[in-house]
Structures are given as C-alpha cells and as structure tokens.
Amino acid sequence: RPGYTLSERTVGVSLEDIFKGCTKRIVIATFSSNVHRVQQIIDTSVRHGRKIAVTGRSMLNIVGAAVELGYMKVPENALIDISEIRRFKPEELTLITTGSQGEPMSALYRMAFGEHAQVTLGASDLVVLSSSAIPGNEKLVSNIINELIKNGVGVLHDSVVAVHVSGHACQEELKLMQALTKP
C-alpha cells in the first residue's frame, strides 16, 4: 500500500514465526549496529529455549558494548561462546553473525564457504538474512545465498519473509524532524 511502511514489530512477528517449531540451528545475519534487531533476535531465541552465540568482530564488539552500557539485556546463561556450540543440538542454538552484505571476510561468508574456524553449515541449518542488500552489494549477497543453497542450507531473506525493515527515516519522519528542530 502507498505510504505503508513495515516496522520492527513486523520483523518481530516474522522472527517468532521462523523460530516456532524450527528444528534447525538458526543463523541470523544482520547489521551489528542495529542493536534493537539484535535484541529482538536474543529475546526470540530465549523464548524458544535457545542458547545464543555471537560471531563476527563488529557483532562481538557492539553486543559487548551494548550489554555493558545497558542498551541490551541478555538473560544470564543465554549467551555462550562460539567455541561451545558443539555441546548443543541444532534446535537449541541461535547464531547471530555479521556478513549480511556478503562481505568476503565476514563471518557468514567464511561459514558459507567452509572457512569459519568454529561453524560448518549444512542441512541442519537455517540462515536468515535480516537485511536487504545495499545497492552495489547484490552480487555479493547472491553469491552467499547460492553457496548456502548449494550446501543444503535453508535460506530466508527479506524478499521471501519480512525479516528486515529499513532503519532509515521515511519522508514523513524527516519532515517531522525538520519541523521540530528547525535546522
């Protein structure tokens, strides 16, 4: 519908639907700077009795800082180190990772191409790309999706299910901010 924008609440409903009854390990790639989205993933994982492991340098740094500063709440014992994932069944785990834009050195890229030190992806995994490709990155993102599918990994992304909404203000929000701040 014209003028209709999806909200983070929509993403929350989609995440809930994905987690409900999922027997696979869920690997979610998103922007590390989207603290609210990462919090939603953590909350949904906890509700579904899953342990959470974080991988990717920027994701580790931002989650660590956000928790320390009180911007993110993680229940005790919910977060595990990536080195501990082998102790859990696939349906007991959520991995939150960087690499939603297909960056060649990112954690998701290394997982997709079998180069990640702790994570090997296969048929018991579901990868969710909770982002949309930034213009110019479409080919990189497609390469990762193709590699994952080739290896039997389930893949969900924003053109299949509402797992991403823009973090940027829409036209009406920009007008409101200009009216309020009178720059």
Image (tube, rainbow, N blue to C red):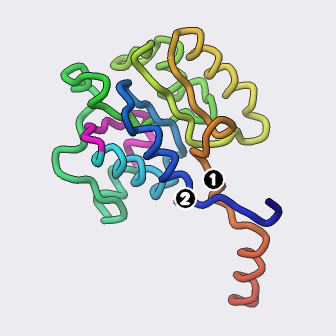
Residue 57 part of the magenta-drawn span: yes
Three-letter code for the amino acid on which mark 1 is drawn: Val
Q: Please tell me which residue is depicted at 31% across the width and 35% down the height of the picture.
A: 53
Q: Residue 24: x percent and y percent?
A: 38, 24
The residue sitting at 43% across, 50% down in the picture is 38
Q: Which residues are magenta?
A: 48-61
Is 40 drawn above or below residue 90 in the view shown?
below
Q: Relative to residue 74, is residue 176 depicted above or below?
A: below
Q: Position of residue 176 (x, y in %)?
A: 72, 82
Residue 145 percent across, percent down from the top left = 62, 22
Residue 92 location, x and y as percent? 27, 31
Q: Nearer the viewer, residue 48 or 93?
A: 48
Q: Residue type at mark 2?
A: Glu
Task: Between residue 25 and residue 53, name the one nearer to us.
Answer: 25
Please give the residue where the numbered disc 2 appears in the rendered image: 8
Query: Between disc 2 and disc 1, whose residue precedes?
Result: 2
Cα gap from disc 2 to disc 1, whole angstroms: 7 Å
Point 46% across, 13% down: residue: 115
Which residue of the protein is positioned furthest toward the front in this rendering?
A: 21
State the image quarter where residue 161 is shown.
top right
Q: Which residue is mark 1?
A: 165
Up the image or down, 103 lies above or below 163; here it is: above
- Counting the numbered discs, the total is 2
Label 2 residue SS: helix
- Dot 2, crowdedness within 10 Å: few (<14), some or many (≥20)? some
